Amino acid sequence: MTRYIRRAATLSLFLLAALFVNAVRVQILQADTLGGSPANRRPAIARYDEPRGDIVVGGQPVTGSKDTGQQLRYERTYRHGPLYAPVTGYSSQTYGTTFLEHAEDAVLAGTDPMLAPLPFWNEFTRSERPGGKVVTTVRAPMQQAAYAGLAGRRGAVVAIEPSTGRILALVSSPSYEPGLLSGNSADVTAAWQRLNGATNHPMLNRAIRQTYPPGSAFKIVTAAAALEARAVRNARTPTDTPDPFTIPGTRTTLPNPVPGCRKASLEYAIKWSCNTVMANLGVKVGLKGMLETAGRFGFNDGGLRIPSGVAPSNFDRRMSVDQLALSSIGQFDTTATPLQMAMVAAAVANGGELAHPYLVDRTTTWDGDTVRETPRRSYRRAMFPATALELRRLMIEAAEKGTGKRALIDGVTVGGKTGTAQHGVGNAGTPYAWFIAWAQKPDAPRPAVAVAVVVEDPEAAGGEISGGGDAAPIARAVMVQALSTAARRP
């Protein structure tokens, strides 16, 4: 009898050991694999079991959460969704997150350890923290002015506070309603397919993810390079540029939009956008000098984040002389995001020092205690202060007496530069109207805002779209709001 009891006990111990080994295998060795399995719905259920924290503009939340009563309980909602979609992005139970919803997901979802009252508190208690808030630098009146100015046309607007780098407006048009993608129903799938299949690409964030030929707006960069390299010693004196000007290494002559560009000064060339003068100066500076200057403004930086990732603006590192001539007037392969061109204007406005652009002022707990605050950081020294001072004067001339008159504001100093980028074989590509500018009140120590506007019109002929006519009025409306809105932290 004792022998049978021993056998039973041995078998029981063996089975117990097997269960223990299997538990170790499942809970430790295979934990990551099983946890990441698409069949495991527990992480998703936990993620959507609490309301998501809000993204805030001007003290008011522009997001919310809706209790659906379903297994994935809370869905994201948006106030003025199309207006703020380039800022917020979307948070979808089906398609994930984008832009601030993605970059600040840990705070909004309540999983950031900094939201806990004590270090490792959540790990010990296994409790869920309410989602925190993301307070943006955006000013609602400026965002609304930019959105209304584009009026559904393809394009983008970016406005920056030059002294700090705070992004005051970030608009992409046409836009979309991010709330359509929040849930996991068949309607969400249909909306996703419809938005992605639209020919006007409403989900494309043109402000930071689309690059365009900058055209004549890039001439500010070329002017900075020419002044820094001493290719121009006095902006008021004539240059040695002929008209017609033959692009080096070719038999092609470069046209000008206005007469009087023969041997024109840099001042005249910026005021009236002489292609020949700026191409000639770019060649004189040389590829190395042009590349270094463009880099100091932010071109070719693939790591810029605001905190969402930004598409790199391009100035080719290897070019022939004829390609360099065209690149120096914002053509050939030179491309830029609207954010990049706003950074160009901001560097001029801020005395040559470029502050790092940023979109999040601070993050907080659900009840408002600050978790982290974005410090003001220097991005790069784009040029010497004397160069920036001269470029400010040239941009004021261009706005007051040249092609940027429609951006002028009574009683305010405005500096601007237009650009109409035509590209493709025979200029058959979509024309883009650019305007970059900055504005300063007479009694202010520094400019309050720098702005870049791009408008693309696939239906317009090249002569029917212009930076001065299409983009400058939008920039003016945004700058008016910047100057009338008290500079306060959101």
Image (spheres, rainbow, N blue to C red):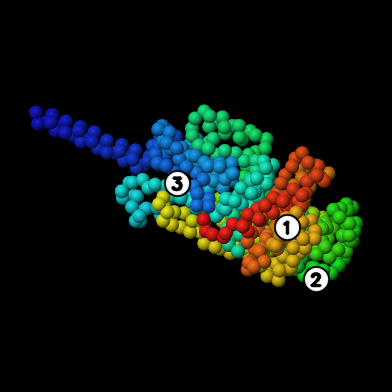
Which tag is nearer the camera, tag 1 or tag 3? 1
Amino acid on which disc 3 is placed? Gly
Alpha carbon of mark 1 to alpha carbon of mark 3: how far? 41 Å
| Residue annotated with mark 2 | 234
Is the residue 385 above or below the residue 368 in the image? below
Helix, strand or loop at disc 2? loop
Amino acid on which disc 1 is placed? Leu
Of the numbered discs in the image, which one, if any, rests on residue 53? 3
Q: From this viewpoint, which residue is outermost toward the left?
A: 1
| Residue annotated with mark 1 | 408
Q: Residue at x 49, y 34 (%)?
A: 183
Query: Closer to the N terminus: mark 1 or mark 2?
Result: 2
Query: Closer to the N terminus: mark 1 or mark 3?
Result: 3
Query: Closer to the N terminus: mark 2 or mark 3?
Result: 3
Q: Residue at x 37, y 47 (%)?
A: 129
Q: Quadrant of the N terminus?
A: top left
Amino acid on which disc 2 is placed? Asn
Query: Residue 8: x and y, percent?
Result: 16, 30
Of the numbered discs in the image, which one, if any, rests on residue 312? none
